[in-house]
Image: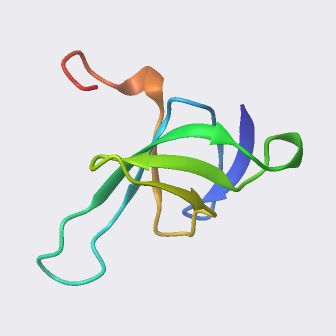
Amino acid sequence: MMEAGLGGAVVRVSVGDRLRFPGRRVGMADRLGRVVEVRGQDGAPPYLVEFEDGHRSEIFPGPDCHLEPRSTWTLGHP
C-alpha cells in the first residue's frame, strides 16, 4: 500500500484497487482499471493499470481520478 494524491486528497492505494477515470467529453464513458502493480519507489506512482478491455498502461493518476478500494467492491464485480 502507499499514499498518493488522487483528487486532491491523500488516499491509500494497493494492488487490486480500481481507478476510475471520467470521460473527457460529454457522452464519453468512464474508463475503469485495476491496479496490477505499484512501480514507484516506496510505493509511489506510477501504477500499472489493466483496463476492462485488457489494455495495460502505466498511470500517474491526476486529480480527476477516483479510487475504488478493493475492500469496497460488492459481490458480483470482478
Q: Given the current orientation, which residue lies at the most extreme right position?
A: 42
Viewed as shown, does residue 55 lie left or right of 12? Answer: left
Q: Quadrant of the N terminus?
A: top right
Viewed as shown, does residue 7 lie left or right of 43? Answer: left
User: Residue 21's x, y, as percent?
Assistant: 38, 62
User: Residue 2's x, y, as percent?
Assistant: 75, 38
User: 67 above or below 46?
Assistant: above
Q: Quadrant of the C terminus?
A: top left
User: 36 above or below 19?
Assistant: above
Image quadrant where residue 42 sits: top right
User: Residue 51's x, y, as percent?
Assistant: 37, 49
Residue at the image position 45 percent from the left and 21 percent from the top? 71
User: 70 above or below 37?
Assistant: above
57 or 4, nearer to the observer = 57
Residue at the image position 31 percent from the left and 59 percent from the top? 31
Residue at the image position 74 percent from the left and 44 percent from the top? 3
User: Residue 20's x, y, as percent?
Assistant: 38, 54
54 or 67, nearer to the observer = 54
